[in-house]
Amino acid sequence: MRAPSIRLLDGSSGGGSVAAMVPQQQKEGESKAKESRGAIKAGRPRVAGGGGSFLPGHLGSTMYTEQLGTVPVVNVLLGSVVGIGAAKAVLGHFSVMVRDIAQLFVAGPPVVRPAMGYDITKEDLGGWHIHCRNGSVDNLAETEEKAMLLTRRFLSYLPSSVFETPPTATPDPNEPPERRDEELFNLIPRKRTATFDVRRAIRLMADRGSFFEIGPLWGTDQVTGFVRFAGRPMGVIASDSQHANGGALTADGCRKLIRHLDLCDLFHLPVLNLVDNPGFAVGLEHEITGTIRWGGQWMIAFAQATVPVFTVIMRRSFGVAGNNYATPRAQPSMRVVWPAADTGGIPPEGGIEAAYKRQLAQAEDPKAFREELMARIESARGPVGPLSRFQVEEMIDPRDTRALICEWLDMAWSIVSQPARLKPRATQFRP
């Protein structure tokens, strides 16, 4: 049993604002600060949430930086969260808000009206449809009870602090590590432009019922969450080919991956890295949103991760994004490919037009020449070439993926549980 440290802001007192508690906080500030540090050393997760509008001296960023780098912090939004409370709501490792009950904003309608000159409701200003889709809040709950269940489930994958290893669940005897799901063999479509359900793939490989998705409504080109294999928790990252852009990395997708990699690295969770990525998203929209800037930060975050990574190249790995996805630097890591693996600098369907632009323009029959080039490239596609050059290490039957991950986790767990690793990481968590 683990006892969390809980902080509540009561909306019936000063609207839940921190200002309403300032006199008492000033009186007990030192004792509360000691209590907070004590909770960290004792390894108690801190569950936070609320609103506010005034910043006492002892509630500055230093204390929150220490907490975020040491214990799990969860923010549960159960009403209107305003001002400094809104800032606190995003300073955590996980957040959940209740549909039609919770709102999040820097300032509410009474402030917006005179400042901006228009009327707006609380829900329209800061409801779930805004903040669960822009990444300010991770998950949406239908009721307060379900918000608590989401909180408990999130915490079940994490240690009480960075000074401990992640908690393991008792393995289900009906789910042996060598379990093989036949559906995995035909999950990847033969047609390269067809999509597949990567969440289904995750569920088929992991312990049944263990997949917990984080941020399903934002950065939707990427999938992040937790899973268990033989009772041991892992983080998981993947691209969603069913997204409108085929899983290409967007600015929001990069932000989502950065945050999740930081979270897994902070709390010593090995990462399952499922690769089916066509590269960075292209076009005017993605230039405007700074996709390449966020992409660069994602590349650095991946390079900074120190936890073991198990990479499965399921299908596509193209361009800077796809190849960075497929080549994590963390040690020790393992990388395997499925038979459908398709890697390269740029997808041939568009790459031919760029690489052979002049030749195509000068060809007597551009269509026939393009088909000839495509046929030549098709003959060399697939995992055999990279395998023969040792650019990838091993090709496996997709049905054997679970068994390999469970076997690899024995080694990975011996690494993450080393006493020298059970400490705050050098790079601070980026909320």
Image (cartoon, grey):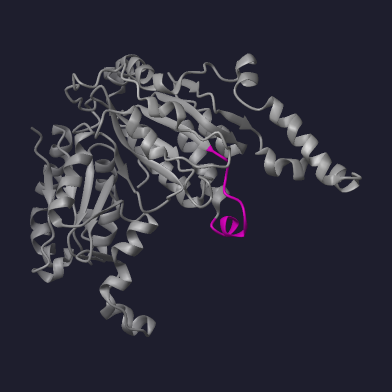
Residue under the point 75% across and 41% down: 352
- Front in this rendered view, residue 288 or 342: 342
- Find residue 5 and report its horizontal and vertical position in percent: 12, 44
Q: Image quarter for residue 322?
A: top right
The quarter of the rendered structure image containing the N terminus is: top left
- Residue 123 is one of the magenta-drawn residues: no
- Residue 281 is one of the magenta-drawn residues: yes
Left or right: where does residue 178 sit relative to residue 367? left
In this rendering, the answer to whether 404 lies above or below 106 is: above
Q: Is residue 305 visible?
A: no
Number of dots carrying numbers: 0
Q: Which residues are magenta?
A: 277-289
Residue under the point 32% across and 78% down: 112
Q: Image quarter for residue 144?
A: bottom left
In this rendering, the answer to whether 234 lies above or below 243 is: above
Q: Is residue 337 visible?
A: yes
In this rendering, the answer to whether 315 lies above or below 141 is: above
- Find residue 24 and report its horizontal and vertical position in percent: 8, 60
- Find residue 135 and report its horizontal and vertical position in percent: 37, 54
In this rendering, the answer to whether 108 lies above or below 267 is: below
- Front in this rendered view, residue 181 or 319: 181
- Find residue 351 and report its horizontal and vertical position in percent: 71, 41
Q: Image quarter for residue 353?
A: top right
Left or right: where does residue 34 sit relative to residue 93? left
Left or right: where does residue 267 sit relative to residue 337? left
